[in-house]
Amino acid sequence: MLLMVSLLTGLLNGCSGVHYYSQAVGGQWDIWQRTQAISHLLLDESIDDTLKQRFNDILAMRAFASRELHLPDNDSYRHYADLQRPYVVWSVFATPEFSLTPKQWCFWFVGCVTYRGYFSQTEAETFADSLSAEGNDVYVAGIAAYSTLGWFADPVLNTMLHWSDWRLAGLIFHELAHQQLYIANDTAFNEAFAMTVEYEGIKRWLLFRRDEAQWQEYQRWLNYQHDFNQLILDFRQELDALYQESLEPSLMAFAKQNKFAQLQQRYQELKTQRWDNFSGYDRWFNEVNNAKLNSVMTYQQYVPALQTLLAQQEGDLLAFYQAAAQLGALSFAQRQAYLAQLSE
């Protein structure tokens, strides 16, 4: 996610205010105070061997990212910070009650994005409550990592360490991809580009490591993720069609409630019929609303199109980055049209 630059530029464009800016600067300063070079930590005799091995693996992932994936070669993810909390930031998504058009917040450096991040969970939930009081659907998501688009050397955080090796590698590839290419005012394109690099990077990383167990785990996860994304995409299209109808608010609210009940039923059918009762998505399906649906589509909507673009470059990542940058140079409408063609 591109949270940190958004946080730090909040005051500059006048859309956030002094308090928002203050918590942003304070949060970033706290990270800087805690950051240490991994190379130095490896020499620290007080750190146990298990954590040191994790650090060595991270440095290998980081080297692979620049050497094999041609991602930026800088100090990002070569340092570590223990924040002593489960997430680095909490991101707020909001959508009108009967619409799937997400609310946006605009910042000087990054343009407009469809989320707003806070270093404090309490602050994020307070802001979400204010949006909910205005009649919006809201969703607060804990975020394990962020990108400053190369403005700062982003560290590895304790919030990432509990993940499996392939997921941690993918996260590093994802965040570095944001440094490789970023298009202002198009959150969905930026996240889809980073997801495409993440997926391709994980595949190449696991082939490089020749870790059969991790490869099998990753393939299972891909199957679950594909089914989940398709379920949400299909449902979102149906829900959008409902919201286009001219219904009284009370009738629309009733129809919306029924629609979301159908989604829960479809999820249970997916679990029993295809997933052998795998429950890994149960938590996500608690209290689903428009905003939570959009949080998924922000990341996944254009991934198939960009994977097609990568295939057109015969897997050449440098050529893919160039083609994606050319796509990013188009107007928003032109880019949308081209992505639609790639998705066919």
Image (cartoon, rainbow, N blue to C red):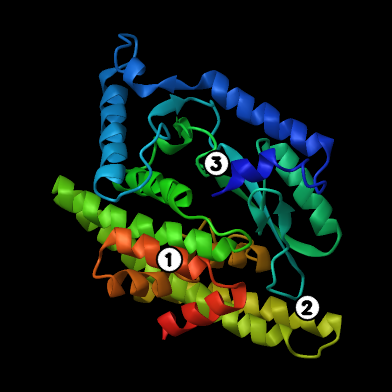
Name which residue type carries label 2: Ala
Q: Is residue 147 left or right of residue 307?
A: right
Q: Which residue is mark 1?
A: 324
- Residue closest to the eye, 172 or 82: 172
Density class for disc 1 (Cα within 10 Å; few <14, some 14-19, many ≥20) is some
Vertical placement of residue 23 versus 204, above or below: above
* Callout in the foreground (3, 1): 1
Q: Is any part of residue 234 visible from this angle?
A: yes
Q: Quadrant of residue 20?
A: top right
Residue at (52, 65) in percent of width and height? 189
Identify the secondary structure beneath mark 3: loop
Give how far across and how far down residue 243 sits, in percent. Answer: 72, 83
Residue at (31, 28) in percent of width and height? 55
- Going from N to C along the chain, the mark reached first, 3 or 2, is 3
Q: Which residue is mark 2?
A: 253
- Going from N to C along the chain, the mark reached first, 1 or 2, is 2
Vertical placement of residue 326 versus 65, above or below: below
Identify the secondary structure beneath mark 2: helix
- Residue closest to the eye, 22 or 148: 148
User: Circles 3 and 2: CB distance less than 8 Å?
Assistant: no
- Going from N to C along the chain, the mark reached first, 3 or 1, is 3
Name which residue type carries label 3: Thr
Name which residue type carries label 1: Ala
Density class for disc 3 (Cα within 10 Å; few <14, some 14-19, many ≥20) is many
Residue at (51, 60) in percent of width and height? 190
- Residue closest to the eye, 23 or 120: 23
Q: Which residue is mark 3?
A: 148
- Spot the residue most to the bottom: 246
Give how far across and how far down residue 22 sits, in percent. Answer: 76, 31
Give how far across and how far down residue 157 sits, in percent. Answer: 46, 32
